[in-house]
Image: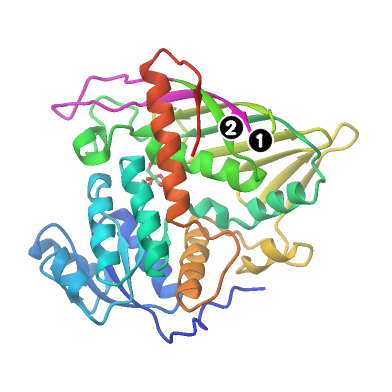
Amino acid sequence: MTTDVTDTGLGTIRAGILGGGFMARVHRAAARDAGGELRAIATRSAAGGRDAAQALGAERAEVDADALLDADDIDVVHICTPNATHADLARRALHAGKHVICEKPLATTADDARELAEAAAAAGLIGAVPFIYRYHPMVREARARIARGEAGDLLTLDCSYLQDWMLLPGDDDWRVRSEAGGASRAFADIGSHLCDLIEFVTGERIRALSARSRRVYAERGGHAVDTEDLVAVLVETGSGALGTLLISQMAPGRKNALTLELHGSRQSLRFEQERPEELWVGMREESRLLLRDPATAGADAGRLQRVPAGHAMGYQDAFNGFVADVYAAIGGARPDGLPTFADGHRSAVLTEAVLDSAAHDGRWVEVTA
Ligand code: SOE
């Protein structure tokens, strides 16, 4: 079964992209897959915008973000710029009456993120944040099993998100400096995905947490680093389940290793982002490895399957599923599990709780919002 991405009710969705890096390319591919037209792109400089427009196949380059936000032939703006610019651009896009897909983190403060969530709701516009791992069919399968009670009561969580692209002192990126990336790096960049997935799959919220973080190199690429490389978090969920989260961008050999292992009173479930075709179901008597298969999937997992069993789906497929749902929502549909600005706000609240706890020797922080 494939997602119907063409019937948006609005006709063809006309997109504009702000930014021209890796994520802009991923968004562009997903917009095309969803039947959208890429009308315009703008980057930091007019020349960069022209290059990006050519590389990504946009109809035109705008000289700057303002010109793109003012354009009246754009329905949705994809914000793929450095983190510190997100809130302002998203606010201006909503103000201009555009639907918005804003890269995570939605904002570098929870207050800004809340204001954006409220503004999108008040304007009746779609505001979405790419927590795209929700769009792996086997993630939906895990969520459905938990919702049906098959796993039993949640007892413990053993979760991690490991990468290695910041392993060496010379590895550098705009995210290492808080003025561009926000006060948190590793947690906001990838821990945010992990927490979103935990709450999405379990249907429970992280109620309290205790975090420790570490910055391994004080300098990278000749400038000072003021964000963390590694974070370890203890969590307690609403029902009292206990968990550990390990987040690192310095784990040699780990490229994009998000692992969600949940232990219920009847079953355990394990999903690994780098093996997205599989879901391990652990049971005391007999454990099983489920493979993605449209023939046996439940409705929610089934609708996200784009190719038959054995034809591996991956990261871009998940991203495509997300953008297809956003475009369908713009057309008036209400797809289940769409990550919205409210989820972006939730993520910012968790990020602030982690920063707060880590700044106070790992003291337990209640997560209220
Ligand atoms: C880099 O850490 C990155 O591209 C993140 O920014 C994305 O959100 C994640 O999906 C993959 O890794």
Question: Residue farthest to the top?
Answer: 361
Location of the N terminus by quadrant is bottom right
Disc 2 target residue = 159
Disc 1 target residue = 261
- Residue 2 in the image: x percent, y percent? 62, 73
179 with respect to 211 (left or right): left
- Residue 106 in the image: x percent, y percent? 35, 49
Name the quarter showing ligand 1: top left
What residue is at 79 percent from the left and 63 percent from the top? 296
Any atom of ligand 1 within 8 Å of the CB at mark 1? no
Type of amino acid at the residue the image marks with label 2: Cys
The answer for how far apart the CA atoms under marks 1 and 2 are is 6 Å
What residue is at 38 percent from the left and 38 percent from the top? 188
Q: Is mark 1 in CB contact (under 8 Å) with mark 2? A: yes
Give residue 163's mark. none
Q: Nearer the viewer, residue 120 or 63?
A: 120
Q: Which residues are magenta?
A: 212-238
**SS at mark 1?**
strand
Type of amino acid at the residue the image marks with label 1: Glu
Q: Nearer the viewer, residue 260 or 221?
A: 260
